[in-house]
Image (cartoon, helix red, strand yellow):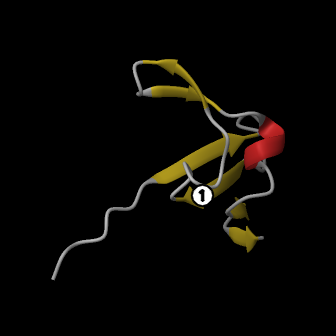
Amino acid sequence: MPFAISTWLYVVTFCKSEKPRLRIIRDPIPKLNPEMLYRQVQFMVEEGDWSSRGKEIISGNVVT
């Protein structure tokens, strides 16, 4: 049985606040419009692109 390859993007915001937020996006490349910055290992994704994707976790609670 072949293994499915999955990638995950973790975006952490409000890091210095009392309630940091974590957004988790599975298989982000087909869902986002990244701009390649360096040799296919560093990408820039605009906030408006990732902020509505995946699941957001605020202080341990999942908010979608």
Q: Quadrant of residue 39?
A: top left
Given residues 52 and 40, the one toward you in this image is: 40
Question: Would you say 28 lies left or right of 16 here?
Answer: left
* Amino acid tagged 1: Ile
Find residue 27 and report its horizontal and vertical position in percent: 51, 58
In the displayed image of the protein, which residue is found farthest to the top?
A: 38
In the displayed image of the protein, which residue is found farthest to the right?
A: 48
Which residue is at 67% across, 40% downward? 33
- Quarter of the rendering occupied by the C terminus: bottom right
In the displayed image of the protein, which residue is found farthest to the bottom?
A: 1
Question: Would you say 34 lies left or right of 29 here?
Answer: right
Q: Quadrant of residue 5?
A: bottom left
Residue identified by numbered label 1: 25
The crowd level at tag 1 (other Cα within 10 Å; few <14, some 14-19, many 20+) is: many
The reply to whether residue 42 is in sight is yes
Given residues 30 and 52, the one toward you in this image is: 30
Which residue is at 71% across, 72% downward? 62
Question: Would you say 41 lies left or right of 44 here?
Answer: left
Answer above or below: position of 6 versus 12.
below
Helix, strand or loop at mark 1? strand
Which residue is at 42% across, 27% downward? 40
Q: Quadrant of residue 35?
A: top right
